[in-house]
Image (cartoon, rainbow, N blue to C red):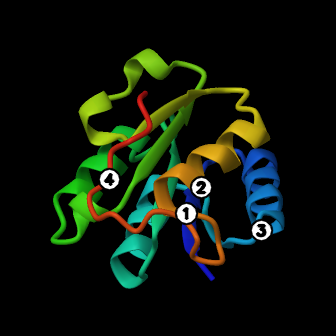
Amino acid sequence: MVPLLVIDDDRALLGLYHQMLERAGYTVHTATSGEEGIRMFDRGDYALVITDLIMGGLDGNRVAGHIRGTERGCVIPIIGISGTPWRAERHQFDAVMLKPVSMKELVSSVRVLVGVPDGEGDDSSCMRSVAP
């Protein structure tokens, strides 16, 4: 299964993202802060990261910056989600989506970036195909 990391300090939204992405066939790991998300990313092996932009402590821009600064950072797609998408440092994200995000659009973006869970999707490395 394709492992995803989802980071959001809103537990209700985090639960919704988890449920919808699992239903779509992905393995979903969640973090409730940027700090926790970075720790999980550093210890894990994720195909894609979804992060809220505005969080207490480390925000989504800093999370994305950390990921991009790692050895595998160019091959990990990152989706930013926010009610204030203009605050995204867009060069760090493969897609930036406006809250409230459509679950159908979120799942579709994940599929474009990492493929469908059974491996039928594109396997290109460092793919940046979803425009913010």
Give me the residue at 57% from left, 76% from top. Answer: 119
Q: Secondary structure at mark 3?
A: helix
- The numbered dot on residue 127 is 4
Q: Are marks 2 and 1 in contact (CB under 8 Å)?
A: yes
| Residue 56 in sight in this render | no
Q: Quadrant of the N terminus?
A: bottom right
Q: Count neighbours of disc 2 (C-alpha within 10 A) and say few if under 14, some if 14 to 19, many if 20 or more.
A: some
**Residue 113 screen position, x and y as percent:** 47, 53
The answer to whether 62 appears left or right of 34 in the picture is: left
The first of marks 3 and 2 along the sequence is 3
The amino acid beneath tag 2 is: Arg
Mark 4 near mark 1, Cβ–Cβ under 8 Å? no
Q: Which quarter of the figure has residue 43?
A: bottom left
Q: Between label 3 and label 4, give the one nearer the viewer.
A: 4
Measured as percent of width and height from the top left, residue 122 is found at 45, 63
Foreground of the two, 129 or 15: 129
Secondary element at image label 1: loop
Residue hosting label 3: 22
Q: Earlier in the sequence, mark 4 or mark 2?
A: 2
Q: Is residue 62 left or right of residue 33?
A: left
State how many labels appear. 4
